[in-house]
Image: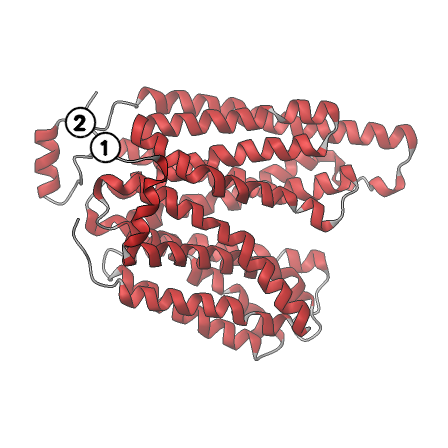
Amino acid sequence: MHVDMSKASADAASGDAAHGYDAPDLRVFVFALFFIFGGITSLNDIIIPKLKELFTLDHATSMLVQSAFFLAYALFSIPAAAIVRKAGYMRTASIGLVTMTAGCLLFIPASSTATFGLFLFALFVLGAGITIVQVVANPLISALGHPRTASSRLTFAQAFNSLGTTIFPYVGSALILGGLATVDSSTLTGAALDAYRAESSRTVVHTYMGLAAALLIVAGVVWTRRNRLNEEQETAGSMFHAFTLLKRPRFAMGALCIFLYVGAEVAIGSLIVNYLMQPSVLALTDVAAGKHVPFYWGGALVGRFIGAYVLQKVSPGKLLAAVAAGTITLILISANTTGGVSAWSLLAIGLMNSVMFPTIFALASEGLGKRAAEGSGVIATAIVGGAVIPYLTGVLADSSGSLHFSLILPAICYAIIAAYGLYARRSVTA
């Protein structure tokens, strides 16, 4: 049913609701969406080495898995915003979940034909669904409450995203690898190798079939809530009308900062293993270095729960500037030291990263009103920075011969983010 507007107005006046949305149970659903799309995205880290092994791929080709995901963000963010304008938040969330289900089911023909291209297509469709859900989830959680605490709510929701990225890889490893984890495929030949590949493909398919069933149930539950919100959407203009928002300096700079933040976060995360393996740092093996990666992402998880509270007390812009400055400090320490200090100062960047995405999003989206969904589409498109900045950081590392020196590019990204925090520290009205 529709929200009682007279009650909602009273709640909004008391600071408990915004835009007529006072639906605590809907917040639970949105938190669940963040958990789901964060967790499923993290399964790529399990799928990449498995597909690399099954299809005997080089590193560059296996990384096309990530490229398929980023391409989905670039191509589907604006169409997703257009769907929200026509269908509303909850219906669009259901569409996104059904699209994710379709992507999971496409693993069946991909496995039966043993075609890497079909696996990529399945992952692309899955990424398209995740893109749609994310375009819905970010502005929706901002709207479900008072505008003053939007950054806090979005940070808390992002913590569930981090929780998903922490839990799913462990569960995915058990399900996708299972008893095959101890098998060295390089020692197999002929029928034994064919049997191993067939069994590996089946475990991947069974995992994603289970996800498909779960996603379909969640989509059905969300669909039953499709009329809970009395929404007002901007309907004028074409699908690409959303890009006119870039004429607003505060929004345009925010979108740029999302591009830079995602790029810097992914670049550092991608460097960690090789960085810790350096003789001047910890001189670890690749396996031992890999076990340190959860400290980076775990810092983001812890920091988001803490940040959700802090953002109720501190100006979002000032906090963004502070954590960005803290990140730059940690980069400088890591790049100019050795041993444990160099290693742990780099890993600690995850804690500083924690509040950046939700805070930048909230600051950029502030005052968009009916155009919030369009803004979310443009910002989601900017996530493609994760495909650009890491590559440029790698080029810098190769050309300079130093991973320490290559950190200068992420540092520049964080410096621009700090400047944006100071620029957007004052609130605006719609």
Residue appearing at x 47%, y 70% in the figure = 412
Q: Nearer the viewer, residue 1 or 109?
A: 109
Residue appearing at x 77%, y 37% in the figure = 54
* Count of marks, rendered view: 2
Q: Quadrant of residue 47?
A: top right
Q: State the image coordinates of residue 359 (x, y, percent, origin top left).
A: 33, 55
Residue appearing at x 83%, y 40% in the figure = 185
Q: Nearer the viewer, residue 226 or 379?
A: 379
Tag 2–tag 1 contact (CB < 8 Å): yes
Label 1, secondary structure: give it.
loop
Task: Note whether 179 is above or below 337 in the view shown.
Answer: above
Mark closer to the observer (2, 1)? 2
Q: Is residue 181 left or right of 90 when viewed as pictured?
A: right
Please identify the quadrant where the N terminus is shown: top left
Give the labeled residue for mark 2. Answer: 3
Q: Earlier in the sequence, mark 2 or mark 1?
A: 2
The image's mark for residue 23 is: 1
Residue type, label 1: Ala
Q: Is residue 402 left or right of 308 when viewed as pictured?
A: right
